[in-house]
Image (cartoon, helix red, strand yellow):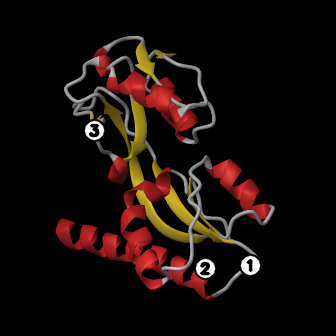
Amino acid sequence: SSAASDVYKRQILRRFDREFPRIRIKLISSYTLKLKEMMARGEIDLSLTTEDDTPPEATFLAEHRLVWVGAPGGTAWRSRPLRVAFERKCLFRPWALSALDRANISWDMAVDTGSTRTVEATIAADLAINAILEGAVAPPFEKIAHGGTLPELPTSKINMYRGAVSGPQVDALAEMVGQSYRETAYLTHAAAG
């Protein structure tokens, strides 16, 4: 699972555990690139990724806008150069930095790390900001109400990949994941309409 699954994984895992109590799931949270490499080696059966498109071998699940996040009540987003914190291999890092460059907003990378916890601590301490999927914003972060002073960010597609090995449990899990995303998209659309 990448950041994509954070929005939905609790409800999916609970349901799968109820329906298949003797099957153990090993949840791997990593970067999209690493998950795709593991999938190619046959090390995982199902993967959720965040990407800028949906390749033919993937199933499109959803599309979410990236948003700027910071510490609750924080002011780091007002500083110039703007202090940002991203893991080195985070797909959203180049997207956010490109948006800042296009908006002519100078920035400074507050941390150089491969650690999610270091990034989270830096943001929670109001030393920097970050960009994440809008549907994944949760404490200790909040969406920054910047009133247009920060650039708009792109959307990210959430895709599902299936491994070469299949079976009733993998099929059921894939269906649960797809159903969860379809239901959430329907509820979001109904609330907006």
Which one is in front in this view, the residue at disc 1 or the one at disc 3?
A: 1
Residue 6 position, x and y percent, is 42, 55
Residue 118 position, x and y percent, is 49, 26
Residue 121 drawn above or below residue 54: above
Within 10 angstroms of label 1, few (less than 14), some, or many (20 or more) residues?
few
Task: Decide if residue 124 is on the left or right side of residue 163.
Answer: left
Residue at 39% x, 50% y is 65
Residue at 23% x, 30% y is 72
Residue at 59% x, 62% y is 26
Q: Amino acid at mark 2?
A: Val
Check residue 170 in the rendering and tell me which mark sits there, or answer none: 2
Q: Quadrant of the C terminus?
A: bottom left
The residue carrying mark 1 is 165
Q: Quadrant of the N terminus?
A: bottom right
Dot 2 falls on a residue whose secondary structure is: helix
Dot 3 falls on a residue whose secondary structure is: strand
Residue 117 position, x and y percent, is 48, 32
Most distant residue in the right direction: 41
- Look at the image and tell me whether residue 4 can be seen: yes
Could you give the CA–CA distance between mark 2 and mark 3, rounded to whole angstroms?
A: 35 Å
- Look at the image and tell me whether residue 102 can be seen: no
The answer to which image quadrant residue 51 occupies is bottom right
Residues at circles 2 and 3 in contact by the CB criterion of under 8 Å: no
The residue carrying mark 3 is 143
**Which numbered disc flags the more N-terminal residue, 1 or 3?**
3
Residue 106 drawn above or below residue 144: above
- 180 or 21, which is in the foreground? 21
Residues at circles 2 and 1 in contact by the CB criterion of under 8 Å: yes
Within 10 angstroms of label 3, few (less than 14), some, or many (20 or more) residues?
some
- 165 or 193, which is in the foreground? 165
